[in-house]
Amino acid sequence: NAGVTQTPKFRILKIGQSMTLQCAQDMNHNYMYWYRQDPGMGLKLIYYSVGAGITDKGEVPNGYNVSRSTTEDFPLRLELAAPSQTSVYFCASSYSYSGLNTEAFFGQGTRLTVV
Amino acid sequence: DAKTTQPNSMESNEEEPVHLPCNHSTISGTDYIHWYRQLPSQGPEYVIHGLTSNVNNRMASLAIAEDRKSSTLILHRATLRDAAVYYCILRGQGGSQGNLIFGKGTKLSVKP
């Protein structure tokens, strides 16, 4: 199994450009998450989804959008990139209706620099 | 949401046991205690979780205090590969709705 796959691994954006970070999982997990991690800090939750067609905001959603049209994919969209969005982005997934008693699987991250 | 408190950093010698503490004095009865670790330049990986009883798996052991206000992650024999940031996270049905909310964690250094 591939697990959680994120693309691209690295990207440099200019201020004001847009891009989509891709995330796919092949474990049939219903829960998916997007986090960002700034240098020396813990992960901050951006958005999450409990199933296809259902998304909700996390701790730091401003400047981002998500969609969940299939169980497998959970893309993260940056519309107008700003230097404050320079970070490492992690996608994760987990299975369970409650989400409390199961482990989450993380991708390897996308390192984004906005200049 | 219930918060956790961990030391910023700890050091260990290779092949010795490591005890990583976590305080969570405001834990609720339905909160699970999860531990994740993050190796350098990688995404977090699951280590172990528990509710009330002590738990063991191939990676580590989790010792939970009787009042559940603290827990300890135990690595029985540290290796150089165990050098990572370890996160203690409470996962419950409160404001976080079961999501994993990360703090700063404990950075574990392992000396050969």
Image: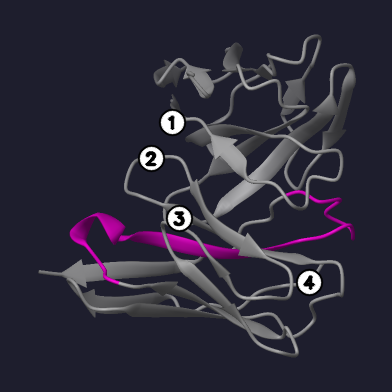
Give amino acid for label 3: Arg
Specify start and end residues of the magenta stretch as a single range. B77-99
User: Regarding mark 3 in the picture, which secondary structure is present there?
Assistant: strand
Q: Give residue B19's position: percent from left, percent from top.
A: 41, 80
Determine whether label 2 and label 1 are within 8 Å by CB. Answer: yes
Residue linked to disc 1: A108
**Residue reaching furthest to the left:** B112
Q: Give residue B58's position: percent from left, percent from top.
A: 42, 56
Residue linked to disc 3: B37
- Circle 2 residues within 10 Å: few <14, some 14–19, many ≥20: some
Q: On the same chain: label 4 and label 2? A: yes
Residue linked to disc 2: B42
Q: Of the two numbered discs 4 and 3 on the same chain, state the one appearing first in sequence.
A: 4
- Mark 4 to mark 3 CA distance (whole Å): 20 Å
Give amino acid for label 2: Gln
Q: On the same chain: label 1 and label 4? A: no
Q: Quadrant of residue A82?
A: top right
* Residue B96 in magenta stretch: yes
